[in-house]
Image: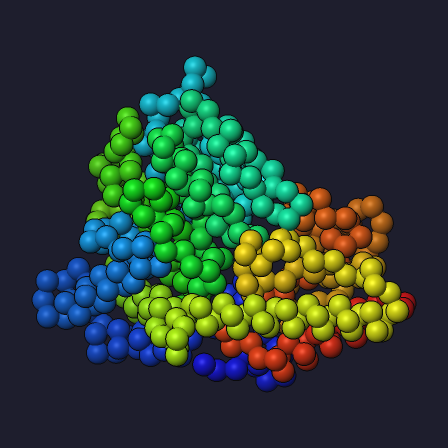
Amino acid sequence: MEATKQKTCVYLDYNGTTPVYPPVLEAMLPYLTDHFGNPSSSHHFGSEPKAAVNKARRSLLSLIQSVPIADLSSIMFTGCGTESNNVAIRLALLSSTHKVDKDGLLHVVTTNIEHPAITQCLNSYISGGLTPKITVTEVPVDEFGRVSSSDVIDAIKENTALVTIMTANNEVGSLQPVFEIAKICRQKHVLFHTDAAQAVGKVDLRGLADERSGADMVTIVGHKFGAPKGIAALYIRPNCLDENGRVNPEHGGSVLLMGGGQEGGRRGGTENVPYTAGIGRAADMLFEQHGDKSGLEANAMHMQKMRSRLLERITTGLEDSTGKTDISRVNGPLNADQRLPNTLSIGLKGVQSGRLLADIGEVVACSAGSACHSSSGPTMSYSAILKAMNVPPEFAVGTLRLSVGPNTSLEDVDFAADVIVKEATRQLNT
């Protein structure tokens, strides 16, 4: 794969987006040239695009199921993770109106560290801007950014229509116990959705959507694992919207985009075949063998190594330059099994991450874990995720999110760490 440097800038923002990997681009090109037909067409030019779309469905199922099912209609392609999340919530609520309480309200369980694609959508139902109207329980995470499965289950009520918990947090990399939560939700006959956008391509999710005890709905986002922006998917377990008193709202057609009946009637609009072929190829790459390891295993080991090197070089560099050992703090799980292998959220005490990023942004591409609205004082604000984890403010306002990828090299990591240390030291000395 190509190097992560573009000119003189090192890319450490893989959680924001990935480059389109060369084999993915190669898989897309035939559907931009020779195989340009509409997959809904019954003639010659529609057959190859249709086959490509169905092949991609199989590839995505292989990411989240131990043994992929034959029902390809369980994968609905969408334009982005936000759409997938919004549709999952809407399907769950509209299918569960039989569970409303005496005030006509449904209930949803989530966490206090979800992506805005979840929280803002839920807020629209809370306010009544969208119906049915709901109440929401946000289960708090611990200091490491992880939620307790027992706390989630304890929050379920008689009128709970949906539990939606992200698989991995995009900012600190904490992995949630979604396998366990999915199993218990199934036993309690409550729909479970997980936004797996940040986890696909970094950890093994096979079994997450197994038919007997897995999640009912799973969000997958292409540009987080080597496919282009503009293609995502929602896995919907067959018949989950018709069980336990639920009535599938899709029997009356799409709940969001009405039109030509594509995606089995779930989403109108001609399929984006090149991008769909791309996300399928990105999924296939994860299970291709590299020696005695799969692509997923090799990538995870490499990214963990790069993350560890990055952390060590930043911490030792700051100690050497300042003579202090309490400048940095890692946010998120300390146990490697409880976090993404590529994500380092590190708080720098006495540093303002916004200023630091502005100064290094042309040579190191990364993001902040805080959004500073003033240069100093009590009005300074920072990430809601870090607040939910009770990260000390003096570290939160100086937090950087550094996320490596399969292409990140030791040279990239060392260069970026040295730049960060130099700029942080400059701030500390002024």
The reply, left or right, for residue 45 in relation to residue 429 is: left
- Name the residue: 83% across, 46% down: 378
Q: Is residue 386 above or below residue 246?
A: below
Image quarter of residue 273: bottom left
Q: Is residue 66 above or below residue 86?
A: below
- Name the residue: 59% across, 72% down: 306
Residue 397, image x and y in percent? 75, 55
Q: Residue furthest bottom?
A: 7
Q: Residue furthest left?
A: 43
- Name the residue: 71% across, 44% down: 390
Residue 170, image x and y in percent? 55, 55
- Nearest the viewer among 399 and 102 is 399
Residue 416, image x and y in percent? 68, 76
Quadrant in which the N terminus appears: bottom left
Q: Residue furthest top?
A: 102
Can I make out residue 93 in this image?
no
Q: Is residue 375 above or below residue 402?
A: above
Can I make out residue 31 in this image?
yes
- Nearest the viewer among 259 and 212 is 212
- Name the residue: 24% across, 64% down: 55
